[in-house]
Image (tube, grey):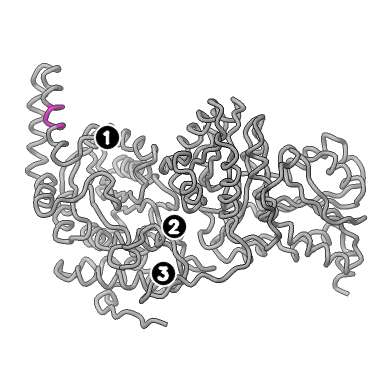
Amino acid sequence: MNPRPETPLLDRIASPADLRRLDPSQLRQVADELRAETIDAVSVTGGHLGAGLGVVELTVALHHVFDTPADRLIWDVGHQAYPHKILTGRRSRIRTLRQGGGLSGFTKRAESEYDPFGAAHSSTSISAGLGMAVARDLAGGTNHVIAVIGDGAMSAGMAYEAMNNAGAAHSRLIVILNDNDMSIAPPVGGMSAYLARLASGKTYLKLRDFGKQLTAQLPKRLDSAITRAVEHARGYVTGGTLFEELGFYYVGPIDGHNLDHLLPVLRNVRDAEVGAPILVHVVTQKGKGYAPAEASADKYHGVVKFDVVTGKQAKAPTNAPAYTRVFAESLIREAEVDEKIVAITAAMPSGTGLDLFGAAFPRRTFDVGIAEQHAVTFAAGLAAEGFRPFCAIYSTFLQRGYDQVVHDVALQNLPVRFALDRAGLVGADGPTHAGAFDLAYLCCLPNMVVMAAADEAELCHMVRTAAAHDAGPIAFRYPRGEGIGVEMPARGEVLEIGRGRILREGREIALLSLGTRLQEALKAAEELEKLGLSTSVADARFAKPIDRALLRRLAEGHALLVTIEEGSVGGFGSQVLHALAEDGLLDGALKVRTMTLPDRYQDQDRPERMYAEAGLDARGIVATVLRALGSQAERAVRA
C-alpha cells in the first residue's frame, strides 16, 4: 500500500472560503497537494482520473476568485469534479467515491450546495447556466454563474444551441471552455497570456462597447461591415471568431495549468461590466501531473484501483469475456463476410468496443463525437443507401437521440441496428448511466424489433440476427461486465424473430425472463423445486415482438406467470400483460406478476447489491412467487 501524500496546506481547507483566505502565492502548493490527493483517492476507489487531473489548477483558481456557492459553478461533464469535491467539504469522504452509500462519481445536487446542477453525461452546462443567469436577473440578483465545459462536450449540438440562445439573451454568463485535447487552439506562451489579460480587462471591454456604439451611428450596412471586419480580424489572431459570432466576448486561449495566467484573467472576467456572456478558452492536458495518465490519457479516463507508483491497474482475473468485447468480436466476424456493415459510435469507441472494430475496418468505423442525435440520423442515411449500420450507444445515452430514433429511423422503417451497451444497472456509475428505460422507450415504437441477450453466446447470436435483419430497425441490449462463462460459438446463428426458448419444464410456476436475469431465474427455480413448487423457466429473447405461442403455453400450463427484466416499469412486463389481455389469457384463474427495476433512481453500489435491493435476484424472485401464491406458501417456507 502506498503512503498517503503529505498535504499541509490542503489540510487547512475545509471549504472554498478557506482557500480564498490564502495568498495567491500559496495556490501553486495547494494545486500540487490537490493533485496528489486526487490521484491517491482514485487509486483506492477507481473512477475517472485523467479529466480531473487536467482541471486541478482551474478548480483552485475558480474557487479562489469566485464566491462559491453563492456564485454558481457548474461542471460539464461531472467526472471532472473530483478536485472540486475535495475542496468543497467532501474530502473526508472522497475515498467513498462511487461506492455504496458514498459520494457520487459526478456532481449531484442532493450531495452538496456546491453542486448547483447535476451532470454526468455531457453538454448541458451552458443551457443550465443560462437558465440560472436569467433566473438571477429576473430575481434582481448579482451573483455570477460559471459553466465549465470540456472533455469533448463541445462536440454536442446542445452546447451550440445554448450558446446561440445565450448570445441573444444578453445575460451575464461565464463559460470556461476546458479544451483538454487542443482541439481548437493551443496556448502560445507569454504573448497569449498577455493578450488574454488585455482582452478581458475593463479598458478593452469598454473600448469594444464604445466602438460598437460609435459604428451604430453609421448607416446600417457600413456599421455591419465594420463590426464584422473587426471581429473577424480579432478572430484570426485569437481563434474566437465562432464564439464572437454567437454573441460571446471571447478570451483566450490561455494555459490552464499556469495560475499566473488564470488568476488575473478570471478576476477580470469576474469584474467585467458587460451585458453579454463571456467565454474563456483554457487549454489543459488530460492526466496532467501523473506520468501514466499523461502517457495514456484514454486508458486513464476511467480506471479501476491502481498502484500510484507504477500506475498498474488491479483488474481482477476472469474466465468469461466481457459483453462489450463479445459484441465487438462478433461484429467483426459479420463484417468480414459483409462489406455493407459499418459501425457508428458517439465518442465512446473503447467503451462500446468499436475501437477493436475500427482497428479491423478503419474506413467503416465512424466516431461522430458526443452527438447521439446526429449518430442516429447519420446511421439512418447510411441505411437508406443500402448499408447495414450498427449504431453502438450506451442505453442511457441513446435517450438523447430518441426523437431521431422515432422520426428518422422507426417512422421510415430503416434497418438501423442499435447495440445498447450498459443495459440494466451499472454499479459504480450510478443512476445517470443505468440503462433502465430502453425497453420502455423502444418497445412502444412501430416497426422496432427489440432483443435482450441472456448470456454472451446469446449476444453473439443477436449480433448476427441484427446483421441479417433488413426488414426494419432492430435493437439488442446487453449489460456491462463479464459474461457467465458459457461455451461460445465460432459464429452466431440467425435467430427467428419473435421466438423465445424454454430452458426448464415445470407444472405450477412459470418464470419468463428477458436478459441476463435468466441465471437468477434458474437459481430461483431450483429453490422453488425444493419447496415442492414445480417451475418452468423460459428466455423470451425478444421483448418485441413477443412470442405469443410461448406466452400462451406458459399461461395455460401454469397457475402463476412471473416476468423478470432489467428495466423500468412500462417495458417487457407491460408488453406481456398487453399480449395476455389481447389473447384473453387474463380472463381465467392465471396469476401474473411483473418484476422490474424499482420506480426510483438507485444510487451507486456493486451491481449484485443493487439487483438484490431491486428484488431481481434469486431470493427476490422466490419471494415474489411466494407472495403471489399467498400466505399458505409463505408459511410452508418458514417451516
Image coords of residue 233 (percent x, y): 12, 33
Between circles 3 and 1, the one closer to the viewer is 3
Spatial CA span between label 2 and label 3: 18 Å
Which residue occupies 69% across, 51% down? Answer: 458
Image coords of residue 278 (percent x, y): 22, 43
Spatial CA span between label 3 and label 1: 38 Å
Q: Are marks 2 and 1 in contact (CB under 8 Å)?
A: no
Which residue occupies 86% across, 50% down? Answer: 591
Quarter-of-image position of residue 57: bottom left
- Circle 2: residue type: Lys
- Circle 3: residue type: Val
- Circle 1: residue type: Gly
User: From the image, which quarter does the C terminus lie in?
Assistant: bottom right
**Tag 1 or tag 3, which sits nearer the N-term?**
3
Left or right of residue 517: residue 148: left
Q: Secondary structure at mark 1?
A: helix
Q: Which residue is mark 3?
A: 42
The magenta span reads 227-232
Q: Which residue is mark 1?
A: 167
**Rendered image: mark on residue 108:** 2
User: From the image, which quarter does the N terminus lie in?
Assistant: bottom left
